[in-house]
Amino acid sequence: MPNDLVAALDIGGTKIAGALVDGGGGLLTRVQRPTPAREDATRMSAAVDAVLRELTEAPAWTRVAAVGIGSAGPVDAKSGTVSPVNIPAWRAHPLVAGVRERTGGLPVSLIGDGPAIAAAEHWQGAARGRAGALCMVVSTGVGGGLILDGALHSGPTGNAGHIGHISVDLDGDLCPCGSHGCVETLASGTNIARRALASGWRPGPGQDETAAGVAAAARAGDPPARAAYDRAARALAAGIAATAALVEIEIAVIGGGVARAGAVLFDPLREELRRYATLPYVQGLEIAPATTGTDAGLIGAAAAAWRLLGAEVA
């Protein structure tokens, strides 16, 4: 059936993924390339082009009606540009114009990766049916998106809910965004590993110098590893509580590679949240792991494309 699919792109600091997606959120053709985040803009654009080329060569491409993009931010949905904090080569990069040209003039929707995970979790995941939610991705960076009054609230530029760049440590480290003490400087996977190493942790057998390696050590009771995750949980709790105080969310959903640490992250996070979320109207705030997994960015980008076409997604 013609025009019963959309194309979705998920552009992050680690990978560039693409898929064709049906109206129920089912992912059909999938493509993925590593993100050349430390290389120049030409190599970055070539990686996106490679993903798009493989999608457009799929037999089902003729059924695609629009393209949705969820990108590491900040993004500017008004101008169609992106300036991801963790991709230095792209500053005010005209991503939407390039994608539109390479897809034969299809309509293109752009949102940040945080709003994308929020759209995905509200459509198919842990925030389904909720009127107010903060949905986060904690990985190479920390992003977030908001569900308010039962609908995605991405803001005029597509960045609303970007909790990773709320400052929770006034004397904290310089963040790549230019501010100090952002949630991302304390809770991203990169910074969890950096803090653990600086505190004396060293990978054991089968571990590496990543947040996953730190999580494995923390499960085994390693003090510096546990302290690094406790510190990350405290930063996340402070940011989540501040958001809840502002907009009265019901649930905070957390996905991304760091969330795969499970209880190592979620146990101290729930404990710390009780310290920070003290006002009566935020004390019942739930914390839940994301359920859309590594597909969240694609599902959320697809939801944005369907909304661009006037279709309703939950």
Image (cartoon, grey):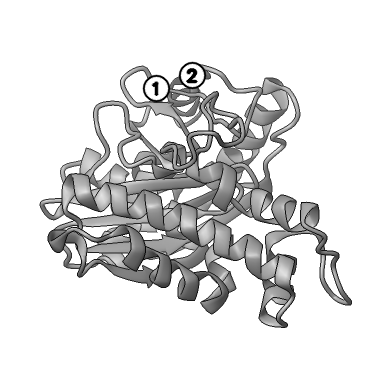
Residue flagged by tag 2: what amino acid is it? Pro
Q: Which residue corresponds to mark 1? A: 80
Q: CA distance from mark 1 to mark 2?
A: 6 Å
Q: Which residue corresponds to mark 2? A: 94
At a point 44% along the width and 55% down the height, the residue shown is 236
Residue flagged by tag 1: what amino acid is it? Gly
Labels 1 and 2: the sequence-earlier one: 1
At a point 57% along the width and 37% down the height, the residue shown is 172
Residue extending farthest to the right is 205
In the image, residue 174 above or below residue 248: above
Residue extending farthest to the left is 149
Instruction: Give residue 48's mark.
Output: none
What secondary structure is found at the residue carrying circle 1?
loop
Spot occupied by residue 280 in the image (x, y as percentages of width and height): 14, 62
130 and 81: which is toward the camera? 130
Spot occupied by residue 69 in the image (x, y as percentages of width and height): 42, 39
Point out the image quarter for the N terminus.
bottom left
Spot occupied by residue 43 in the image (x, y as percentages of width and height): 72, 28
Q: Are marks 1 and 2 in contact (CB under 8 Å)?
A: yes
- State left or right for residue 120 relative to residue 20: left
Whether residue 255 is visible, yes or no, is yes
- Classify residue 27 by image quadrant: bottom left
In the image, residue 273 above or below residue 58: below
Residue extending farthest to the bottom is 220
At a point 30% along the width and 54% down the height, the residue shown is 241
289 and 272: which is toward the camera? 272
